[in-house]
């Protein structure tokens, strides 16, 4: 557009210069030699215009050259802008592997920051961003947060991605995916989701079925399994040896064992099985002795509890010794204090 205006102005200038020379200076014609080659005889006015025309051509080439450079630089910024949009989208999606190559220093700085930044919309910004790519991703994130199921395949996210996990969690809650489907496929579903689903699964599954996926056992799911033993609903029968194997597969603390014993007390496990379970467990793991003592005191089995405390070191199990002393003084406190 500017070159067109410049060309029109240059032509007008050349016409005015030629007209002025021809009208007010001279109307004569002359011939000149160009590197020994005689040129046709032309009006002096035309020969005056020739250098101006050559200057116009030279300036036009100069302008076109730098215009081309400017357009190339502008193209770099436009491409880098598109890459920044992609980097923002990747950051919102929580992609772990992110890398974009930028050709401009300013966008390279922003890109580097985005590649090492986790982003998540603090509120619903759907429709507030004037960019189709970003707005689409924000809509997807908001839908997932609301419990909807969306299509994430175009974004090629890993199974451990938080949005992927939540989206599949939404599918599970809506009944699109079954527990068996999730538990049986380690390639498509993350361990985080599988462990969550396993907690639901053990509430109703048979012993043989939930033992197939026992590597997903957690303290929460173990608590549910123990509470189902001889329970009124969804009852199961399982040997102490199998329960012991499940408990040993977890890295449980002293307090965890006590919580498990307290949980069993609220279920239907018969006292004899409960006592035997924690007795066997305490024989193999010292951290379970507190839970065994808790079980004995909870079931008012004071004689074996006294025998165990008498054979302990003076600095061991002082809380239970204090509890025993208080009971001996008719000071009754709830055993739940130890949970």
Image (cartoon, grey):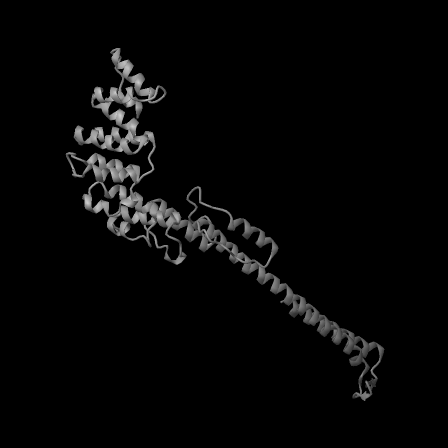
Q: Nearer the viewer, residue 11 or 54?
A: 54
**Residue 267 appears in the figure:** no
Picture coordinates of residue 315, whole percent (x, y): 36, 20
Q: Residue farthest to the front?
A: 311
Seen in the image, is 114 located left or right of residue 182?
right
Q: Residue at (34%, 47%) from the top-left corner? A: 191
Q: Nearer the viewer, residue 137 or 279?
A: 279
Seen in the image, is 95 located left or right of residue 235?
right
Picture coordinates of residue 90, whole percent (x, y): 46, 52
Q: Quadrant of residue 237?
A: top left
Q: Quadrant of the N terminus?
A: bottom right
Picture coordinates of residue 69, whole percent (x, y): 64, 65
Q: Residue at (32%, 52%) from the top-left corner? A: 186
**Residue 100 appears in the figure:** yes
Q: Quadrant of the C terminus?
A: top left
Seen in the image, is 60 located left or right of residue 221?
right
Relative to 170, is 336 above or below?
above
Seen in the image, is 129 located left or right of residue 68?
left
Q: Nearer the viewer, residue 33 or 86?
A: 86
- Total numbered labels placed on residues in the image: 0
Picture coordinates of residue 236, whole percent (x, y): 17, 39
């Amino acid at each position: 557009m500017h070159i067109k205006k410049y060309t029109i102005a240059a032509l007008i200038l050349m016409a005015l210069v030629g007209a002025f020379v021809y009208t007010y200076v001279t109307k004569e014609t002359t011939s000149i030699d160009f590197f020994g080659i005689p040129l046709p005889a032309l009006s002096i006015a035309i020969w005056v215009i020739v250098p101006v025309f050559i200057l116009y051509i030279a300036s036009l080439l100069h302008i076109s050259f730098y215009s081309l450079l400017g357009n190339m630089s502008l193209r770099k910024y436009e491409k880098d802008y598109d890459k920044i949009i992609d980097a923002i989208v990747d950051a919102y999606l929580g992609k772990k592997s992110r890398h974009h190559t930028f050709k401009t220093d300013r966008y390279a700085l922003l890109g580097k920051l985005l590649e090492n930044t986790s982003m998540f919309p603090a509120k619903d910004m759907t429709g507030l961003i004037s960019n189709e790519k970003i707005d689409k991703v924000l809509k997807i994130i908001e839908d997932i947060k609301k419990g909807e199921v969306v299509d994430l395949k175009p974004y090629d996210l890993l199974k451990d991605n938080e949005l992927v996990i939540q989206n599949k969690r939404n599918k599970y809650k809506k009944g699109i995916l079954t527990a068996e489907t999730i538990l049986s496929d380690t390639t498509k579903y993350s361990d985080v989701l599988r462990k969550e689903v396993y907690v639901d699964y053990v509430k109703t599954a048979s012993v043989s079925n939930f033992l197939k996926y026992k590597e997903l056992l957690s303290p929460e799911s173990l608590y549910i399994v123990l509470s189902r033993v001889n329970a009124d609903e969804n009852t199961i029968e399982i040997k102490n040896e199998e329960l012991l194997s499940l408990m040993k597969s977890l890295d449980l603390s002293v307090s965890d064992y006590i919580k498990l014993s307290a949980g069993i007390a609220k279920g239907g496990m018969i006292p004899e099985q409960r006592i035997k379970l924690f007795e066997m467990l305490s024989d193999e793991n010292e951290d379970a002795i507190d839970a065994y003592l808790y079980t004995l005191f909870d079931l008012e089995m004071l004689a074996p509890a006294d025998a165990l405390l008498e054979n302990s070191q003076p600095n061991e199990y002082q809380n239970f010794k204090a509890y025993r002393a208080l009971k001996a003084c008719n000071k009754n406190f709830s055993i739940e204090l130890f949970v």
